[in-house]
Amino acid sequence: MHENTHELDLTIVEGRPAHASVLRDLAEHTFREAYAEDTDTANMERYVARHFTLEQVLHDLSDAQAQYLLAMHNEEPIGYALLRRNRTHPDTDGQPALMLHRIYVRRHYWCKQVGASLLQYIIQIAQKEKFACIWLVVWDQNIRAIRFYEKYGFAHCGYELFQFGDEITNDWVMQKKI
């Protein structure tokens, strides 16, 4: 599935095993860009070492319930999303759900509709596959992300513990009913 958007001549492609190293590098880079200024360096290094490995990306690419989407501009990877199907959360309604596990964009492309294009694409997937909702977990201190999700109809519905290195936070669960 490919989709071209008008902003930046963006193309969204489904992640394949051939994209594994690109996805791993992009995931680490965009995560660091998003949180390095606001988090403890040691915790950042622990989290990245555990969660952004080539083995983890390959595992997700081989999982029929997981899906990577890669946003490309002029053949350059500039953002991605990771979806997990049929994952529910105690604070959502328990119906078939699509989890938006990750969505990140390179900082240079923030405010250029890349995240919006990815999210609209994800909403179309959820509608086509007849999910009752899309849900995600977001750090309650990430006001920029929370406002972004609220703009697209996501609402705070609960909490989930998140381990970041040695730190545990009580992050927000947000959902959008489809």
Image: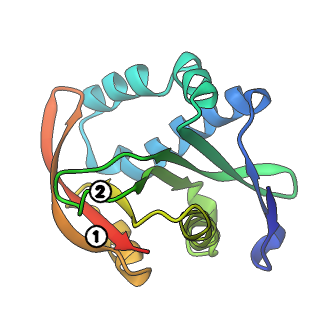
Q: Report the number of discs.
A: 2
- Residue 147: image x %, image y %? 34, 77
- Local secondary structure at mark 2: strand
Left or right of 130? Residue 174 is: left
User: In the image, which is nearer the foreground, mark 1 or mark 2?
Assistant: 2
Q: Quadrant of residue 62?
A: top right
| Picture quarter with the C terminus | bottom left
Which residue does the image show at 73% across and 47% down from the upper left?
14
Mark 2 = which residue?
138
- Residue 24: image x %, image y %? 60, 31
Mark 1 = which residue?
143
Nearer-N-terminus badge (1/2):
2
Which residue does the image show at 24% across and 34% down from the upper left?
164
What separation in Å lies between label 1 and label 2 (alpha carbons)? Answer: 9 Å
| Picture quarter with the N terminus | bottom right
Mark 1 Cα shell of 10 Å, populated few (<14), some (14-19), many (≥20): few
- Residue 28: image x %, image y %? 52, 35
Which residue does the image show at 59% across and 20% down from the upper left?
54
- Residue 152: image x %, image y %? 44, 80
Q: Quadrant of residue 60?
A: top right
Which residue does the image show at 62% across and 22% down from the upper left?
58
Q: Amino acid at mark 2?
A: Val
Mark 2 Cα shell of 10 Å, populated few (<14), some (14-19), many (≥20): many
Residue that extends furthest to the top in the rendered view of this protein:
55
Q: Which one is in front, 159 or 169? A: 159
Q: Amino acid at mark 1?
A: Ile
